[in-house]
Amino acid sequence: MTTQTSGIELADRLSAVGFSEIVKVRNKILAMRERGESVLQFEGGEPFPNTPDHIKDACVRALAENQTRYAPSSGISPLLEALSEKLRRENGIPASASDIIVVNGGMQALFAAFQSVVNPGDDVLMYSPYWTSVRDLIGLTRGKPVLVDTVEARRDGIRASLEASLTERTRVIYVNTPQNPTGIVLTREELEATAAVAREHNLIVISDEAYEHVIYDGEHVSIASLDGMYERTITCYTFSKSYAMTGWRLGYAVAPEPFITGMKKLTLTSTNGVSTPTQWAGLAAITGPNDFTYWCRDEYRRRRDLLVSGLQSLGFEIEPPAGAFYAFPDARAFGTDSWEIANRLLDRAGVACLPGVIFGPEGEGHLRFSYSTSPETIERGIEALRAVL
Ligand SMILES: Cc1ncc(COP(=O)(O)O)c(C=O)c1O
């Protein structure tokens, strides 16, 4: 008997989505560790501390009080109110609680944002290098990323660079500041220029502010706070980086109509909301003391300075990044193929970092090192590299 299998395949929309290339590096590290080799890890994207106790305690309390039932799928109302207050105070975004949705991390916020506004065949303008998942999120909408080189745009003028890449199908600009992987913090003027292009060409902005609290030089500006921008912007946030809550899967998005209805429909028909005790933990994070985020920022700055001066002493070209917790040095003194360089550093020095090309063609010739690790690891990593470079 023959079995027909030709229809047994994935839906077309998944063809533009890959498994992250970061997984390849992680698998290689695992295999090395299994062989008993030691690896100094700089490839990750997690805050180094644990979640603060007052946040964990709030979750335990919520469980003890049986806050374990369905919550409204957009979020519990005390959290929405607290977020609305935070957005007005810290971000200058005039959001009411009904413009906010609590979701499962920054990733789900971005997923819902792109799904809400990008039609198949639409173009999405984005600065490159970019966080790799964004390309997949756009692929899933069957839209197309159109890349604008960040460094060139900052040098030659944001407005002219964005306008040169516009097409008849451009519908959205994705903006990420502070930026992963470069650590660039876009200035108010650069965001004003981006906003002017959005307003003049009637584009929607998706703003990814995952690292809003990890900033050393300059200020964090939310593009939705600029004149005439709130009505055309979906802003995505996560608790992951600000409060060391990566494993909790908690984030939120803010946008006016019609976007927020789209985001609510997508949440209702996918996760149907975030686990209730997790939301009570989120409330403690937002309303609790700020010292944790300030402490983290100072610790990241110390680690940044240690890594950057070490990399400079080895011959990498790099200026201290202004935000996030990644260094993205130019590695062309050591070769042109960033996969080859990253593999060489892992094989010969046991130092794991990521090849810049996985963050877009504009990242080729660079490497991404996370400095969200101990100062000892950074010092040992630099010495291990010195021995092989
Ligand atoms: C730029 C950027 N945006 C969004 C996210 C999503 O964060 P999460 O889904 O952990 O909340 C990340 C995570 O690394 C990121 O780097």
Image: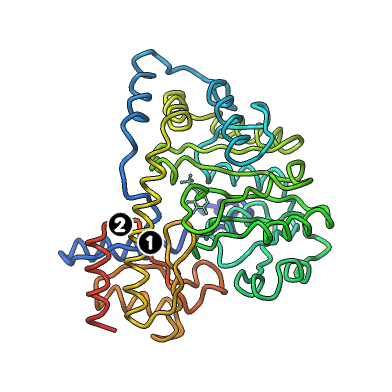
Measured along the vertical axis of the image, is residue 163 above or below residue 295? below
Instruction: Pick out the residue farthest to the front.
Output: 218
Label tally = 2
Give the secondary structure at mark 1. strand
Location of residue 379 by image quarter? bottom left
Residue type highlighted by circle 1: Ser
Q: Position of residue 218 (x, y in %)?
A: 54, 57
Measured along the vertical axis of the image, is residue 190 above or below residue 207? below
Q: Position of residue 254 (x, y in %)?
A: 64, 37
User: What residue would you read off at disc 1?
Assistant: 370
Picture residue at 32% right of the left edge, 62% below the top: 27
Give the secondary structure at mark 2. loop
Picture residue at 38% right of the left edge, 79% below the top: 341
Q: Which of 75 and 239 is in front in this view?
A: 239
Label 1–label 2 contact, CB within 8 A:
yes
User: What residue would you read off at disc 2?
Assistant: 373
Quarter of the image where the C terminus is located: bottom left
